[in-house]
Image (tube, grey):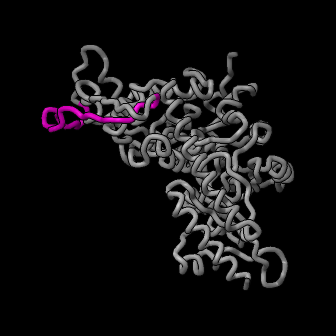
Amino acid sequence: MSVQALPADYYTPLLSDVAKQRKPNPIRGLYPLEARPGMISLLAGKPNATTFPLTSVTIKSRSPTDPSAELTTEISGKVLAEGLQYGPTAGLPDLVNWVYGLQEYEHGRKKGEGWRISIGSGSQDVLHKAIVALVNPGDPVLVETPLYAGVMPTFEALHCEFVAVPTDSKGIRSDVLRSTLENWPAGKPKPKVLYTVPYGGNPTGMTAVKERRQEVLQLAREHNFLILEDDPYYYLYFGEAPRPPSYFTLERELPEIGRVIRFDSLSKILSAGIRIGFACGPEPIMTVIDMHTAVASLQTPSLTQAIAFALLNSWGYDSFKTHTQAVSQFYREKRDVFEKYMKKHLEGLAEWDRPEAGMFFWFKLLLPAADGQGEQDSESVIRTKALEKGVLALPGTVFLPNGGKTPYVRASFSLLDEADVEEAIKRLAAVVLEAKGA
């Protein structure tokens, strides 16, 4: 099915003042001309590669199809030369092209449909730059609540007005979002962006169902906002039902595409320390993200890009999928162990929905408030009593974009072995029982 992309000038009113004022890097903007046949370049102050001491890099990895086997990949020659030198701001061409293939393989999105890729130093890097490119100081922004705490500082630094949309076990409440937008104050500019983590949301662990996503996409058309689809847990989906399609996939069903900016990460499936993520979205937005990168850090490190590409290319897309399925199964087993001991020690003391992706449990402590109305805030219990008993978790209040109190707690199940899981939950149970006066 052919798709119609929104025109480039559609995005001009959506860009922030900072983005509109950005100018291309005067040196990097000319890099493509160096590739012209016969061109002699006196342009860039690139170091001479003959002075670099590295002659090859060898990486060993577990085989995705046979974990008992070890694969060896050597990076040398042209690939290593590119990895040791300055490279294009948007990413090394080999890795960029591999990601294009991945997005077609996973999301049905083809190159040439009005979108492109920008490689970042982790998905949070390109997410931060996208927000700066779209949001002016004081702007209202649509965010799900509870909200990923790591994105709050970017919005807060811009003194944004958080327009919080609640979530439940089926994802963001699209009915509340519709009501909010349809009853927006007359004369007040509507939000230009909606931020959401649709799979294994951090902190709630929720995964948005297809129907909610479709409703949000329709609202984006009706009310003219862009969806920031922050998806680091996409490959950590382990629910019983088939994985719902991404916003990036679903927008192909609309009359035109271009309202979704997707953020992917290799941190949870390849290496957190390699710091590689990527944004996919409309060309005008990717251009201003790249302009930001060009003046901030020039580019994502070429060597880590070369290493990632060498590994991923040696696997191919089918083996990459096999690897991610193994990773998601690993976290499913971790979830099941964690919930086993929650049922054993916290039954009647807490309530929760079972996460279908990611690495977090979001649970409500059943502690009556002092006035007898509702539940007690988790802040003091978790920050003081739990800490004193040697267990560290996050009180839910840190995930509320407009502050406030909540009986909820976020706990990660990604690292602990079974014995430590049970001990941690036993300690939490003891804290709750003590707080209840039991």
Relative image position of residue 140 (x, y in whole percent):
69, 56
- Quarter of the image for residue 164 reads bottom right
In this rendered view, identify the residue nearer to me: 30 or 245.
Answer: 245
Please tell me which residue is depicted at 81% across the width and 50% down the height of the picture. 181
Q: Is 257 drawn above or below residue 364 in the view shown?
A: above
Relative image position of residue 133 (x, y in whole percent):
55, 46
- Quarter of the image for residue 382 reads bottom right
- Quarter of the image for residue 50 reads top left
- Residue found farthest to the top: 37
Please tell me which residue is depicted at 48% across the width and 27% down the height of the picture. 319
Relative image position of residue 300 (x, y in whole percent):
38, 41
Q: Is residue 236 visible?
A: yes
Task: Magenta stretch: give its range.
Answer: 43-65
Please tell me which residue is depicted at 42% across the width and 30% down the height of the picture. 312
Horizontal arrangement in the rendering, residue 311 relative to residue 261 (left or right):
left
Relative image position of residue 58 (x, y in whole percent):
26, 34
Q: Is 372 drawn above or below residue 89 in the view shown?
A: below
For the N terminus, give its image quadrant: top right
Residue 63 magenta: yes
Horizontal arrangement in the rendering, residue 411 relative to residue 146 (left or right):
left
Residue 123 magenta: no
Q: Is 144 drawn above or below residue 119 in the view shown?
A: below
